[in-house]
Amino acid sequence: MDQEKREELVSGHRITEKCAHINQLWKLYLEREMSGFGIYQSQCRILMYIAAHPDASQKEIALAQRVSTATIAVALKKLENGGYISREASEEDSRFNCIRVTKKGREVADGSRRVYLHMEEAQFQGFTEEEFRVLDGFLDRIRLNTEYLFQEKGISW
């Protein structure tokens, strides 16, 4: 392997490690800040989605969260048991449940949203619009290249 190729691999590895570290920091921060809400950080994300998309179906929620419908079903059951959401059969189609955030759920969703916004503001402090645009383009390219790995194996993301 020539020196140039080796340097490319080292640079790519360094960036991958940095992305993984940023992801770990995100999770640690969110877990710490959301620990007082009484539900897990992943449930907070689901709750925020439902608050922003009233009456979304389980399938829509699963697609938005990039998880299986079974995972959403379990999370919704826990959120319902905790009093964060309510589910009622749709008047138009009894096979469909209308999922709505309760007052308790709204408070947690609003608190979660504030935590996310604070994290984003802190994380991108000092970035210019041009830097945002360039970074966004790079991250899109990395995401698409990574999604291609799934397509090579015939797996849909």
Image: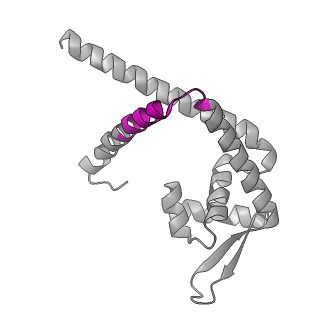
Residue 144 shows up from this direction: yes
Examine the residues drawn in magenta and state their main secondary structure.
helix
Would you identify the image quadrant in which residue 102 lies?
bottom right
Which residue is more in the foreground, 76 or 63?
63
Residue drawn at x 75%, y 39% as measured from the top left: 33
Residue 27 shows up from this direction: no
Residue drawn at x 38%, y 41% as measured from the top left: 140
Would you identify the image quadrant in which residue 70 lies?
bottom right
59 falls in the magenta region? no
Residue drawn at x 81%, y 65% as measured from the top left: 103
Q: Position of residue 29 (x, y in %)?
A: 68, 34
133 falls in the magenta region? yes
In the image, which residues are magenta?
123-140
Q: Is residue 87 above or below residue 50?
A: below
Query: In the rendered view, how is the structure colored?
Result: one colour
On the rendered structure, is 71 left or right of 157?
A: right
Q: Position of residue 134 (x, y in %)?
A: 40, 33
